[in-house]
Image: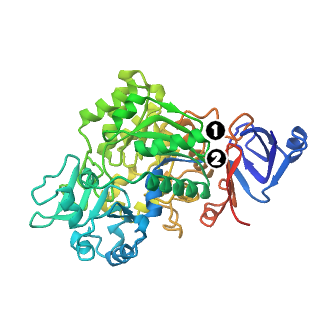
Amino acid sequence: METTVYLAERIWTLDAERPWAQALAVRSGRVVAVGTREEVRSLVQGTREVDLGTATVVPGLVDAHAHLHGLGRALTTVRLEEAPSVEVVLLRLAQAPASSFQGDWLLGRGWDQNEWPGGAFPERMELDARFPSTPVFLTRVDHHAAWVNGEALRRAGISKDTPDPEGGRILRDERGEPTGVLVDNAMDVVAAAMPPPTRAQLETRLRAALERCAHVGLTGVHDAGMDLDAFRVLQTWDAEGSLPLRIYAMAAGQGEERHAYLEQGPWSGRMLTMRAVKFLADGALGSRGAALHEDYCDEPGQRGLLLMPAEELHARARAFMSRGFQVCIHAIGDRANTLVLDVLLRESEATGTRALRHRVEHAQILRREDILRLGAAGLVASVQPTHATSDMPWAETRLGRERLKGAYAWRSLKDAGANLALGSDFPIENPDVLAGLYAARSRRDSSGRPEGGWFPEEALTGLEALEGFTLGPAWASFDETRRGRLVPGQDADFVALSVDPVEGPAEVLVGARVLATVVAGVEVFRASP
């Protein structure tokens, strides 16, 4: 087997004994030598060399919370991100490509009423005028609300007399009629009336998502709630040897498919692993579904939604822990985080599974006492840096200044003892890992605002941010002996960047490029010269 030596201006190894190097030798998918150019050449003579010039090489970057099928659907249906008004949304829908249809349903995602004049939720009449007989289902940017038209409501059997489902809201006008906006579990009522994607659609979406991930420098993804059909496709590709990235999949634990996953139990292949399960405790802050201890500042009387009763969440967590699964629970609001900590601590004690490294997904708004509880227990805090920079223009309107002191609190969580694993939650955010590194360090948007950063005391250092996308996900997926560093014997997963993400100023990450992505010694992406 041929040995390949990669040369670069700097290679961050994340090995405490030798933090950086200039050369890296790879054979049979593993790192076999790291050091200066002279050292590595003397150890592996007569090999192929790849000179990356002034690039900086880092260990494989992993998104610790993302949605592959969701990204694939976003890439192949109508994209509504950054649409500045309802009128622009309607224009994009009118130009929808054929891939935007699932059966005869028109799909799109990414709308955000906070970006529109007035900031109000849209209504179905605006869709009905353009699409009177075609059902339309448009997912909000956070995937915790949907905007649908009258035909979609009709097919789902939703009318003025339909009660809100548990853990969901059907927004209504002054006459009690559904407006067309559905929050959290109410979305599922309409989604159930939609035909499933065909196998060909599913494969197209997953391939598009995997290709995009490689292009942005990801060598692995933790998929936060994988549906069974997508998992079966990836199993087939893994068996064929055609899966290009490493996928650590969390079983979708919210719906009926959980029974099949429980029966199967944890599963591991070559590039695909399923040993975790994902539940959702509450909704999202942008759609006011995040469960809070106190009222929303901009909607008195509303405290968000718990998506299942506490006793049910306890029961499901206990069942999966007993089966050997790591339990990962979505928690945005402070009330949801309190509940999730209660569940994880109590049920892991009852089942003797503290060693399964249970995870709080998002850990977004917490009371100080819960930050300390999470850290003391050594749980994984799976957080998304770009959520903070996306939410900061309106988060204070929702929460007020005081509650923001425990929101997006990465430094406080780390100092308390939590194990940080960083991600993006794509497609809710872009899968751009460089943007995540920048947000983690700067707590500013791409234009540099606000000056000095938003609650800058919660920022991470350049090294901590890099560790959050490398060592953190490796530990959170039980792979710390195989990945996360570039040392002999570990998997040859690494990324070449146009800038140094650790010692260069944070601002250089905004215009940085991914030059190459290597997984198990195989180049899955190389940028054009």
Q: Residues within 10 Å of mark 1 (few under 14, many from 20)?
A: many
Does residue 247 show up? no
- Applied colour scheme: rainbow
| Residue 465 x/y as whole percent | 58, 50
The C terminus - image quarter: bottom right
Q: Mark 2 sits on what residue?
A: 60
* Number of numbered discs on residues: 2
| Residue 255 x/y as whole percent | 31, 41
**Of residues 174 and 93, which is closer to you in this image?**
93
**Of residues 108 and 503, which is closer to you in this image?**
108
Whole-number angstrom distance, CA of label 2 to CA of label 1: 8 Å
Q: Is residue 131 above or below residue 104?
A: below
Q: Residues within 10 Å of mark 2 (few under 14, many from 20)?
A: many
Does residue 416 show up? yes
**Of residues 440 and 457, which is closer to you in this image?**
440
Q: Mark 1 sits on what residue?
A: 483
